[in-house]
Image (cartoon, coloured by chain):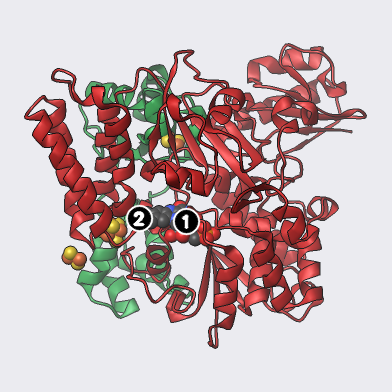
Chain colours: A red, B green
Amino acid sequence: MTKVYIPLDMAAVAMGADRLAAAVTKEAAARGENIEIVRNGSRGMLWLEPLIEVETPAGRVGYGPAKVKDVASLFDAGFLSGGAHRLSIGKVDDHPWMTRQNRVTFARCGVIDPLSMDEYEAHGGGAGLARAFQIGPAATIEEVTKSGLRGRGGAGFPTGIKWKTVADAPADRRYVVVNADEGDSGAFADRMIMEGDPLSLIEGMIICGYAINGSKGYVYLRSEYPQAAVVFGKAIEVAREAGWLGTNVRGSGFAFDIELRIGAGAYVCGEETSLLESLEGRRGIVRAKPPLPAHVGLFGKPTVVNNVLSMATAPMILEKGSQHYAELGVGRSRGTMPLQIAGNVKYGGLCEVPFGLTLGEIVNDIGGGTLSGRPVRAVQVGGPLGAYLPPWLFDTVFDYEAFAAKDSLIGHGGLVVFDDSVDMSWMARFGMEFCAIESCGKCTPCRLGSTRGVETIDKIRAGQNVDANIELLKDLCHTMKFGSLCALGGFAPYPVESALRHFPEDFRKPALEAAE
Amino acid sequence: MSGAGQYSDERAREIIAAHMGLEGPAMPILHALQEEFGYVPDAAVKQMAEALNISRAEMHGVVTFYHDFHRAPHGRHTLKICRAESCQSMGAEKQARAFLDKLKLDWGGTTPDGALTVEPIYCLGLCAHSPSALYDGEPIGRVDAEKLDEIAAEARD
Ligand SMILES: Cc1cc2nc3c(=O)[nH]c(=O)nc-3n(C[C@H](O)[C@H](O)[C@H](O)COP(=O)(O)O)c2cc1C
Ligand code: SF4
Ligand code: FES
Ligand code: FES
């Protein structure tokens, strides 16, 4: 029996993986070949999806991007024993995209069957939790703190310190909440983990629950990720059947359970207090801080809110020890960052590397430049609230501090590449429009300022009083930055200001047509 | 396609009751109602408010806050086209505009025969295959004008 891997990852499915799997099954039956198809996560080489992998004595060999029409020729070429074919990429682990990475959070993603507890454990799964149970809650938190892990949701807050705050808060109940709202354009790492290695997120949540003495975990997943909902829902069942959830987790006497909740298309619900409001069944209006969710969180109880990646990295830190993780990275940015390279780019995908590469290395060396073949003009880093950076800033080092120094942010690690056909005044307008659409409405600068911003940019684009309106726009940005309660209104000016600063010529064209 | 169920107070009551054991049941109930009826009927919202012991105004506030919930039936099929930054970098905005113009629709509009509703969506996490879309829950990468036309034709059948 030959094992054939065809990803269930939503990106692979969007490129035809389900139809491909059906065609391979049919062709194998017609040819009397004995195969087993495993639906794995993606390896992150998204431009090769759907990527078929075949297990051979020499290792796993890949073919991609494979279409239904390629199936017959793959069988003809003897792909089941690694035969040569136009789509062959050779041994997957030897591919340059893979060899340059240091996969910690994504070590198992794409490698194992995401819903097999046996394979999860065979690849180190469970070792982190076992060690946590062995060293106890306080030492577990200490390990996470010493690793230097910072929240991957955007703000970069030290994860261990957050856990300690919750553990120390007096309460009869504490909650673990995972933020899987991943609304940033250009970001898909959370989705890939939830589809490709969901048990690592579950293990991380159990470790966190144990460390803070909490018994219930919620995952708040955006509705735009239907595949992640299906796979993660099944993973919860797999974990429960294996005795990882329930009243006696792995025979430890510790009780913990997890529930998946689905959002409803509000970007602002990625903000942690808005998310908690939504979980409680209200409008996702941002709460003023303090109190912090760590003190007064879900249903008024101390609550850890962590991003999917922060939580899913915890098991690896416990398994290998904090030192192992802390040794990677630069400055105060320790460990690895799963970069997500997207947009108009030749090699789009997920690449987990230690902090410290330059933006140029990421865009040009790893991403291969634009898909269109035209020159890169701008890269937006960190989602819709992130700045647009021009090629002359490509020497910026990818870490939290270096980006902050350039008035930008790395956010969730998503990068969107634009070629020279982009109209930056239009993108600035879109940034303001997005803020207006998604504002929770609590503060005036965000709610009204963004709408004013759209109108003002429209005037600039129409060539009306351009100088005065650019000044007005800058003022608006200033007001939003300093008068907004949360980072939606507070950071929405970053893409706008960076567009103005680096691409001023795009705001001074003779009357542009709308939507150009 | 979901949402074939005819509205009945009875059925709404059952759905609400089935979720009352949850902590913070409102969002799961709203999703379940929309799944069942294809939209969130005002009559169901009234029942929800009673069950959850909050005012109807507050309950309506919740329904209208979230882009996903709609208060009236949509077309038989739904196409959600991504218009976030990554998809824009690959020309999504112009392409979507041309498609909407051809159907004589605006964002959120439904074709006169009730076949297709076209909505904007802000990132599907398919940004390495921009432009992207979701048709009745099925993800589609590298969407082009031809694909959009196919969908419009298929929806009419
Ligand atoms: C408008 C807005 C949207 C956000 N969206 C997300 C998100 O989708 N995922 C996420 O993990 N954090 C998001 N955050 C950050 C969260 O508020 C919070 O800092 C994070 O979930 C904490 O987890 P971490 O410490 O593991 O990063 C968002 C913040 C704001 C202001
Ligand atoms: S900045 Fe905007 S999204 Fe944030 S709390 Fe204020 S109104 Fe709400
Ligand atoms: S509530 Fe803050 S401005 Fe109205
Ligand atoms: S921006 Fe369209 S899928 Fe992410």
Residue hosting label 1:
A155
The answer to whether the residues at label 2 and label 1 have Cβ atoms under 8 Å apart is yes
State which chain disc 1 sits on: A
User: Residue, x 62% and y 48% (percent of image)?
Assistant: A193
Q: Position of residue A105 (x, y in %)?
A: 68, 49
Q: Amino acid at mark 2?
A: Ala
Q: Amino acid at mark 1?
A: Ala
Q: Respond yes or no on whether mark 2 lies under 8 Å from ligand 1.
A: yes
Q: Counting residues from the N terminus, which is met first, the one under dot 2 or under dot 1?
A: 1
In which quadrant will I find the N terminus of chain A? top right
**How busy is the neighbourhood of tag 1: few (under 14 within 10 Å), some, or many (20 plus)?**
some
Q: Secondary structure at mark 2?
A: helix
User: Residue, x 23% and y 49% (percent of image)?
Assistant: A478
- In the rendered image, residues at marks 2 and 1 fall on the same chain: yes
Visible residue check, residue A46: yes
Quarter assignment of residue A65: top right
Quarter assignment of residue A495: top left
Q: Position of residue A396 (x, y in %)?
A: 50, 35
